[in-house]
Amino acid sequence: MTLKQLIHEALEGTPDGDPHVIARSIRRRVPTEDILNLIAREVEWTQRGLARLVEQEGMASFRSRFSGQPLPPMPGVDPSLRALFRSSFHLGDGSSVSWGDATVEQHEQRIAFLEKQLDGISRTVTKHREAIKVINEAGAMCLNDLGEAAA
């Protein structure tokens, strides 16, 4: 079972659980190769973050400096989309693809992956709003102030 599958399995029961608790619960089941892949994905995310900074300063200039060739003119294609052509995104199954090479199906796969994350985020937001309501109604500072009744 891959690391991604282990994570998805763990998230099925607790989609908004504490990431550190979930990580501790599955770390003994993770093959070494998957740990290396996880580190590689983190490197990719960091690289993407650095690229975003450069995009804000002018992605076209950056791309032509490092690729040796600017992207060809593409009438009707928004420059912000063109700037992504050589960067990649994850599909949610452990694989990734560049924006320029991604098929319609791969874009749809990414959308489904992101929508699933949004659902989990939405549930977490709802729980935080519920906690705020309970805290305010009780006149407390935090949930722990509610004592035994909160447990």
Image (cartoon, helix red, strand yellow):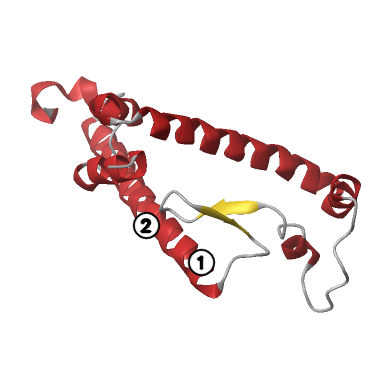
**Judging from the image, what secondary structure is the residue with disc 1 in?**
helix
| Between 71 and 117, the one nearer to me in the picture | 71
Point out residue 145 in the picture as x, y percentages from the top left corner. 22, 21
> Residue at label 2?
116
**Which quadrant would the N terminus be assigned to in this image?**
top left
| Between 2 and 112, the one nearer to me in the picture | 2
* Amino acid bearing label 1: Gln
- Could you say which disc has been placed on residue 106 in the image? 1
| Between 150 and 92, the one nearer to me in the picture | 92
**Can the viewer see residue 12?**
yes
Q: Which of the two discs, 2 and 1, labels the residue nearer the N terminus? A: 1
Few, some or many C-alpha atoms within 10 Å of disc 1 (few <14, some 14-19, many ≥20)? Answer: some
The quadrant holding residue 140 is top left
Q: Specify whether 10 is left or right of 111.
A: left
Q: Residue at x 53, y 53 (%)?
A: 96
Q: In the rendered structure, are the residues bearing label 2 and label 1 in contact, judged by CB atoms less than 8 Å apart?
A: no
Q: Residue at x 21, y 31 (%)?
A: 138
**Judging from the image, what secondary structure is the residue with disc 2 in?**
helix
Point out residue 118 in the picture as x, y percentages from the top left corner. 41, 55
Point out residue 7 in the picture as x, y percentages from the top left corner. 31, 40
* Amino acid bearing label 2: Lys
Q: Specify whether 25 is left or right of 61.
A: left
**Which quadrant would the C terminus be assigned to in this image?**
top left
Compared to residue 113, the image places residue 77 above or below, namely: below
Q: CA distance from mark 2 to mark 1?
A: 15 Å
The mark lying in front, picked from 2 and 1, is 1
Q: Specify whether 60 is left or right of 1.
A: right
The quadrant holding residue 113 is bottom left
